[in-house]
Amino acid sequence: MEGDAFEKQASYQLWHLLYSFEGDNTPTGSGNLIQKLMINYGFEKEYATILSNISFQPDYGSLSTKAIRKILPYLKEGNEFSVACTLAGYKHSKNSLTKEEKDKKVLKNKLDILPKNSLRNPVVEKILNQMINVVNTAIDTYGKPDEIRIELARELKKSAKEREELTSVVAKNTIEHEKYRAILQKDFGLNHISRNDIIRYKLYLELEHNGYKTLYSNSYIEPNKLFSKEFDIEHIIPQSRLFDDSFSNKTLESRSINIEKANETAYDYINAKQGDKGLKDYITRIEDLYKAFKISKTKYNKLKMSGSEIPSDFIARDLRDTQYIAKKAKSILEELVKDVVSTSGMVTDRLRQDWQLIDVMQELNWDKYNKLGLTEIIENREGHKIKRIKDWTKRNDHRHHAMDALTIAFTKRSHIQYFK
């Protein structure tokens, strides 16, 4: 399959949705993915649930689409993956060197900075050179390591200022969400309030200037139906086309319209279903909200975006960069030490929970959140009373990066194999 046709296949985009989905690690978050699988790909709930529980192994995202195109025909012939890789001219294992070959390999004492434009991708070069500088500084300070364990973190792309701003936003949102939690308990009678419930309420407040009417069908949302199955949290630009689960890509809409909209952008759907008059009214509604400072510039732009304006190479480029960084990072580090052990976020998350490091983070933050009135005592299933911080997420404390690094450092091959 030539050109971009491979990346545009529904099966390819389905894989990328499963591989990159970052919903909450809760039944609500899982439900979001189940809904996307049902709406975007037509799976029955039973099968969508099975697919949503798939956990990819660390190396599942390591092949480029070029490699997949070469290997796939041999897999279709009935060959095992390792045989198909060999027939396509690829080594099945990245760690394919024998022990003897590893022992004979000449290793560097320090890593060399990548020359400018050597990879023809300035973003990738910057990320890898940051890694090289950190490793070289560690060598100068503590000596050369015998083994390196890695997990490619998305936060690596953020600057110190961006991380600081993110921490500030998270703290502000935590206080704001607690206010909303009280409103939902008092005015809507909700007892067990999820993060999704709060997002739904915030989207509802955005529509106040439009008389609490949805943006696509202009349907009034009665307060007693806000948390019913009649209305969905809808992605303005479908995630299968732009993997964006941010607040700026969400709005409320009736479930029937959400299903009917399917894989179209909001703009294209309105244009196709309601014609020039409907589109003009829709544009007026979103412009009024934007001028009244009820929606952000980012959301306004997404509401006006047609499918043709979505960067055509967004999915493929994002996937290729992530794959290439992971592959290149490991390749560079293997020039320094014999053994480089890579792990996945799934393993790190599981070990962090099993080793109760999340509890440690809450203990470190307890006094601060307790003074703000953001703590509570709950009773678990065994009847034990447990103290916890309300609406807690590890991102409330930037030290979670250090916590993750420690988890990865103590992750052994046996742990990785156990979770496979």
Image (cartoon, helix red, strand yellow):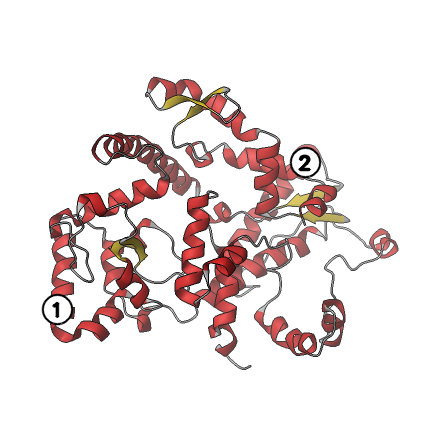
Q: Is residue 169 above or below residue 200?
A: above
| Crowding at mark 1 (Cα within 10 Å: few <14, some 14-19, many 20+) | few
Determine which residue is flagged by label 2.
Answer: 410
Say which of 325 and 125 sits in front: 325
Q: SS class of the residue under badge 1?
A: helix
Q: Residue furthest right?
A: 100
Q: Which residue is nearer to you in this view: 65 or 53?
A: 53
Identify the amino acid type marked 1.
Lys
Residue 77, can we see it? yes
Q: Which residue shows up at 69% across the image and 33% down it? A: 142
Q: Choose top left, top right, bottom left or bottom right for residue 325.
A: bottom right
Q: Which residue is mark 1?
A: 280
As drawn, the residue found furthest toward the bottom would be 2
Across and down, in percent, residue 358 comes to 53, 30
Q: Are the residues at dot 1 and dot 2 in contact (C-beta closer than 8 Å)?
A: no
Image location (x, y in percent) of residue 408: 63, 39
